Image (spheres, rainbow, N blue to C red):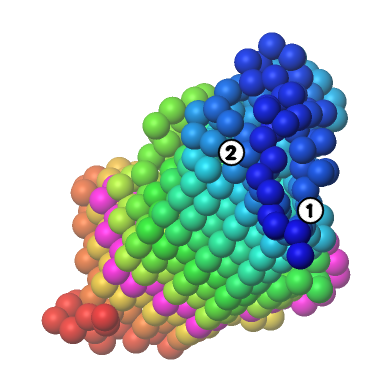
Amino acid sequence: MLCAKTLNAVADYGADYTGATFATTNLQNAIDACLPGDTVLIPPGIFLLNNGLTLKSQMTLVLSSNAVLQANTMGIWLKNRSPILSGKGLDQVTIEGGGKIDGGGLVYQRSSGIEPGNGLRFRDCTNVTLQNIAVGNIPTFGVNFENSENLTIDRLTIRGRGFDNLHGSSDGMDIQGAAHVRISHCNIEVGDDALCLKTIDGAHPCHDIRAGDCTLASTCNAFKIGTGTVADVYDVVAEDIVVNRHSHPGKGNPIASGDCIAAIAIESNDHHRVHDVICRNFTINSCYCPVYFELQNRQSYEQGTMGNLDNVLIESVNCLKSVQPIIFNWQCDGANKMRDVTLRDITVRNFGTRTGANLTCMDGSYPDANKNGEANAYGIWARGVSGLKLECLKFYDEGRSKREKLVFDPSVEKVDSSQIDECTSKSP
């Protein structure tokens, strides 16, 4: 049996670490030379890329501290539209080491309709570990897993500008149709959704997802299930999450203040079921809407009936600043309602000053908490939910809007508010 080797991309394969010439071929040669169990070491330096790198199964890539994989900023990478690091159908891949992947994304215009590839993209892969790396300046998804399973993601830092009309960033981390995923100690600040779970085909549900001890900032949504739900999403726990305002939101953001649209967004749009979801121990320092539930039938990807959204627990949430209340919105007269949702131990300080109004119904358009108007409630505004349990809720009209605390559309039924002010007993 051969012993595993460490292949040094500079010493063994001559990669330029000064950033003066392209290192793509040298780095790819080192990866291609790996036998099962081998490691490619990228030592400190700047490694300029004019194309993405394709990984192999049963390998480790060590991107050393002070090493940077730098996508070419003169447009070559834009034309290739390649992820910086990618793999398809791989098993047993680890990327670690403390280094940085830089997409050079500030030179690209979102509005042009042409964007380069993801920072890291894995499709149909198993047993992938990402730990202790940084990803920045990616105009599209920073880290993207599609139809993969057994994923460990720990201590990732992902950075991108606010939404911005010209030079914004896209999603930070997307988990699409993936299963058995563990996400921990990540810090994500991007223009679009920070941490997003969704499904992209009917054969791959998204399930057994655990995310914890993370800090999120976005000028769209912070933690989100959706928009795409073309298969079920279930068995999801997100806990011990801090949501901040983006530090450099830029111009042209969906929310003028640069706050995220929703700190927690849970949606079913495409005929399938979102269920058994827990969001626990969230500190929301600033947002537009603290929690947004939404159910509709977009008919975007396939014809079908309305999906389901049920068995959701939101507990131990402290929102220090919002404009909207907690929102449940629905496609009016839809076949199904949202069901069996518990809100427990939640505090929301609402600084909205407008009178607000009843929200318009979901109508198949793109779903976000800012699309249907500003609600005439400062605590909860609800439509299309059956089986709503309210325990230990504290809402403050800090903006002195004089809106109602709770506004329930006639479609809401089976509300248990007997413990809405009861805070002596909390779940562990």
- The residue that mark 1 highlights is 35
For residue 385, side relative to residue 424 (left or right): right
Three-letter amino acid code at the position of disc 2: Leu
Q: Give the quarter of the image for residue 379.
A: bottom left
Magenta span of residues: 301-325
Instruction: Find residue 317 and report its horizontal and vertical position in percent.
Output: 31, 64
Give me the residue at 75% from left, 59% from top. 2
Of 276 and 145, nearer the camera is 145
Which disc, if any, is residue 174? none
Q: Which residue: 38% across, 40% down?
A: 245
Mark 1: secondary structure = loop
Residue at the farthest top position: 20
Query: Vertically, is 261 above or below 116?
Result: below
Left or right of 214 on screen, residue 379: left
Q: Whole-percent x and y of residue 37?
A: 70, 57
Q: Nearer the viewer, residue 345 or 407?
A: 345
Q: Which one is nearer the viewer's eye here, 234 or 74?
A: 74
Q: Residue at x 26, y 87 (%)?
A: 418
Q: Is residue 86 visible?
A: yes
Name the residue furthest left: 424
Of residue 187 and residue 371, the one placed in the foreground of this image is 187
Picture coordinates of residue 225, whole percent (x, y): 58, 62
